[in-house]
Amino acid sequence: FIERTGGDNSTERFIPFFSEEPTPEAEKKAFAKAWAYVQASQPCIIYYYSKYERTHYRLLREKYPCVCTEADVEAMFDPARAVDLLYDVVRKATEWPTRDHSIKTLAKYLGFKYRDAHPSGAASIEWFHRWVEEGDPAVKQHILEYNEDDCRATRVLLDGIRTLAA
C-alpha cells in the first residue's frame, strides 16, 4: 500500500505486506496484517488499478475465511470508498496518447520511472517463484521494489488524472 495523509505527497510512505515464508500460514498472516491495516486506516479511499486486487482479495478471503467475511471484502471495494482507476476512470473518462492503458505505460507517460528496466507482472511472478525456490533476500527485495513502484505509479496516475480534471 501507499499511504498519504490529505493527498500530501510529502507524507507518502510504502507499507508492504509479504509472506516471510512460502507457506499457507505465512500467507494467511500477511493477509491478516494487510486486512487489519486497511481496517485501522478507515475512513480512507482506496485507489487500485484493474480488477486483480478485488479478485485476489476475494480469493484470499475464500482461502482464509477467519480473516474477514465476504461482505467485508465487498464493502472494502464498494464504489463509495474504492476506485478502480482503470475501469472507473481511465477507460470511461480519459484519452491518452499511448498505445495501451497499462499502468506502466501511463505512469511512464506521466514521467514515472520504474527501478526495473523491464517491469511486468509476469516478471514479478517469475521473481516470486525464484524467491520460493532459492529464498534469496535480493530477489525478495526486487519483488518489494517492483510492488512499491507499481503502487507509486498508481499514485502518479491518480495525480495526473486530477491535474487533467483541474
Image (cartoon, rainbow, N blue to C red):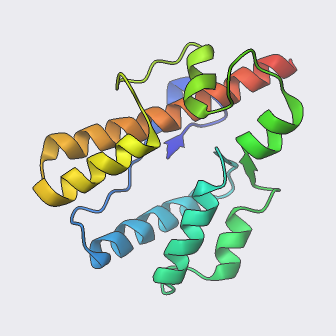
Residue 37, position in %: x, y?
49, 60
Instruction: Relative to 2, say whether 100 is above or below.
Output: above
Residue 122 % position (x, y): 42, 45
Could one spot residue 67 in this view of the protein? yes
Q: For the point 28% across and 46% down, which residue is it? A: 127
User: Which residue corresponds to the image point at 52% horizontal and 24% vertical from the top-left?
Assistant: 10
Residue 111 picture location, percent across and down:
56, 13
Does residue 77 appear left or right of residue 18 in this picture? right
Q: Nearer the viewer, residue 113 or 152?
A: 113
Res 104 → quadrant: top right
Q: Residue furthest bottom?
A: 66
Left or right: 147 with respect to 93? left
Which residue is drawn at the image coordinates 51% and 38% (left, top)? 151
Rendering coords of residue 33 (x, y %): 41, 66
Please identify the quarter of the rendering in which residue 133 is found: bottom left
Q: Number of callouts in the render?
A: 0
Looking at the figure, which quarter contains the C terminus?
top right
Q: Nearer the viewer, residue 116 or 61?
A: 116
**Observer able to see residue 12:** no
